[in-house]
Image (tube, helix red, strand yellow):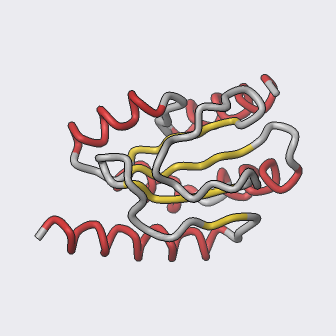
């Protein structure tokens, strides 16, 4: 469990990738920066989650896109059972969803393993939707 977060911490240092593990702090930062939240619910003992993380760190351009356009919230379900309200979480990991700064779900969630290119498309389309809502 702790090894997974240690791994993510090392990745975050390597790529200067900032993420939050506390929902309330992520909401505050989302409001301050006027950015949507990209929520990832993972498990440190889930092979699909570990494979996803390994794939993600190899895609610097996707990490940079996430960092530039979203507030990232990472919840390791094995260590933190505080799941944000207003999402359609069903207990499966990996789980991905984009939230508005008020905590409500912006886009349909993705449940289960996803390739990085599909994740990028999901985030890109979510950001377009977010920007339309701002107008």
Residue in view at x 75 percent, y 64 percent: 112
- The number of numbered discs placed on residues in the rendered structure image is 0
Residue in view at x 51 percent, y 54 percent: 87
Viewer-proximal residue, 33 or 55? Answer: 33
Q: Is residue 97 above or below residue 46?
A: below
**Image quadrant occupied by the N terminus:** top right
Percent x, y of residue 79? 73, 26
Viewer-proximal residue, 12 or 134? Answer: 134
* Horizontal relation, residue 131 to residue 99: left or right: left
**Image quadrant occupied by the C terminus:** bottom left
Q: Residue furthest left?
A: 135
Viewer-proximal residue, 130 or 8? Answer: 130
Percent x, y of residue 33? 23, 42
Q: Is residue 81 above or below residue 115?
A: above
Percent x, y of residue 54? 76, 51
Viewer-proximal residue, 87 or 2? Answer: 87
* Horizontal relation, residue 14 to residue 101: left or right: right
Percent x, y of residue 57? 66, 51
Q: Is residue 75 above or below residue 54?
A: above
Residue in view at x 80 percent, y 37 percent: 44
């Amino acid at each position: 469990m702790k090894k997974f977060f240690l791994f993510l911490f090392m990745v975050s240092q390597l790529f200067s990738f900032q993420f939050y593990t506390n929902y309330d702090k992520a909401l505050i930062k989302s409001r301050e920066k006027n950015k949507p939240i990209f929520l990832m619910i993972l498990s440190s003992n889930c092979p699909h989650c570990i494979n996803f993380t390994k794939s993600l760190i190899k895609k610097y351009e996707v990490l940079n896109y996430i960092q530039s356009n979203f507030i990232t919230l990472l919840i390791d379900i094995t260590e933190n059972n505080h799941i944000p309200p207003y999402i359609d979480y069903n207990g499966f990991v990996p789980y991905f969803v984009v939230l508005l700064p008020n905590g409500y779900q912006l886009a349909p969630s993705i449940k289960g393993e996803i390739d990085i290119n599909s994740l990028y498309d999901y985030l890109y389309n979510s950001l377009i939707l977010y920007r339309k809502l701002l107008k």
